[in-house]
Image (tube, helix red, strand yellow):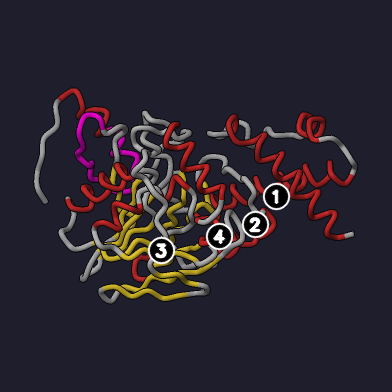
Amino acid sequence: MPRFSLPRRLRAPLLALAALAIQAPVLAQAPADAGPAMAVAAVGPHSHYVEGLTQLGSPKNQNFISNAGFVITPEGVVVVDALGSPRLAERLVQAIRRLTDKPITHVIVTHYHADHIYGLQHFQQLGAKIVAHSASREYIQSDTARLRLEASRTDLAPWIDGNTRIVPADVWIDGPTALKVGGVVFELTPVGPSHTPEDLTVYVPSEKLLFAGDLFFNGRLPFVGQANSKQWILSLERLLAFDAKAVVPGHGAVSTEPKKDIGTTRDYLKHLRQTMGEAVENFVPFDEAYEQADWSAFEAMPMFGPANRMNAYNTYLLLEQETLQKK
């Protein structure tokens, strides 16, 4: 691995960031305009990940708000998720190149939310095959995806611009699929509709490693959006069935205590459904229901401010629909 030196003024903060990883990370070099540091942390004998910031996407952070990972096999590198801008994907590739010169053969997409897929075009240019669940196709072709990209070209400029595009998969899967690269098996399991219709988990048995995508937000509140929270809770139980020593979430630090950490996301979703469900059943207006609900178990968690009221409102609407469907 090539050696490099850092100015003294940068060594202390970067070493402090390195100490947060479960193993000593490799810090990716990047130009001065590259935004926040990108630390690569080992999560298995041949696997690594980068952790996005617990923030909303912005020009300052280049939309570096989600995680991505990769596994180095004897024949090539398999990447899981592509980060939230082409520049971030480029920086991730630079970090990978500091560990190996093997080709990047595949990128597996856990779901097609913008912060996980706007980097795909860079990997496509390198010749990597993109693998995703076929349920993604509906979103890719939707007005929602188009309008989100148009807004991002303004809100996240210059990192998202007129050249940024949504890249479809080269390989679409519909059910459980085993991808084998260099003798390493990647077990792809559809678990949607949960956070999204196309949710995929990626389990690497030889590494005892699970990539959970946005089914799992570690140490912070999730964004629920239009998710099927009932199915999401069931899918979280499925995550615990894997024999994983480490679980890489879509957001937040890698978990080496999956039962506890995944349980926090599950308990939050259950609390949303219980509080908003009681309100719907008793015909309590949302604003009143939100003020009456007890959020004390979660209000100290990062992203509570930006996420919780929206999560509660979307859950309230979902439970109204579920109630009507029962009648």
Q: Is residue 19 magenta?
A: yes
Local crowd at mark 1 within 10 Å, few (<14), some, or many (≥20)? some
Residue drawn 43% across the image and 40% down it: 65
- Indicate which label's residue lies in the foreground, 3 or 1: 3
Amino acid type of disc 3? Ala
Would you name the residue on which mark 2 appears? 233
Labels 1 & 2 near each other (Cβ < 8 A): yes
Which of the marked residues, 1 or 2, is nearer the chain's N terminus? 2
Amino acid type of disc 4? Glu
Image location (x, y in percent) of residue 14: 25, 33
Labels 1 & 4 near each other (Cβ < 8 A): no
Which disc is residue 138 wearing? 4
Which of the marked residues, 2 or 4, is nearer the chain's N terminus? 4
Q: Which residues are magenta?
A: 16-33
Local crowd at mark 4 within 10 Å, few (<14), some, or many (≥20)? few
Which of the marked residues, 3 or 4, is nearer the chain's N terminus? 4
**Distance of mark 2 from mark 4, alpha carbons?**
23 Å
Q: Left or right: 3 with respect to 317?
A: left
Dominant SS type (magenta)? loop
Q: Left or right: 189 with respect to 164?
A: right
**Distance of mark 1 from mark 2, alpha carbons?**
7 Å
Residue drawn 52% across the image and 42% down it: 147
Would you name the residue on which mark 1 appears? 270
Would you name the residue on which mark 3 appears? 169
SS at mark 4 in the image: helix
Q: Is residue 160 magenta?
A: no
Labels 3 & 1 near each other (Cβ < 8 A): no
Image location (x, y in percent) of residue 297: 66, 36
**Distance of mark 3 from mark 1, alpha carbons?**
33 Å
**Distance of mark 3 from mark 2, alpha carbons?**
27 Å
Which quadrant of the view contains residue 309? top right
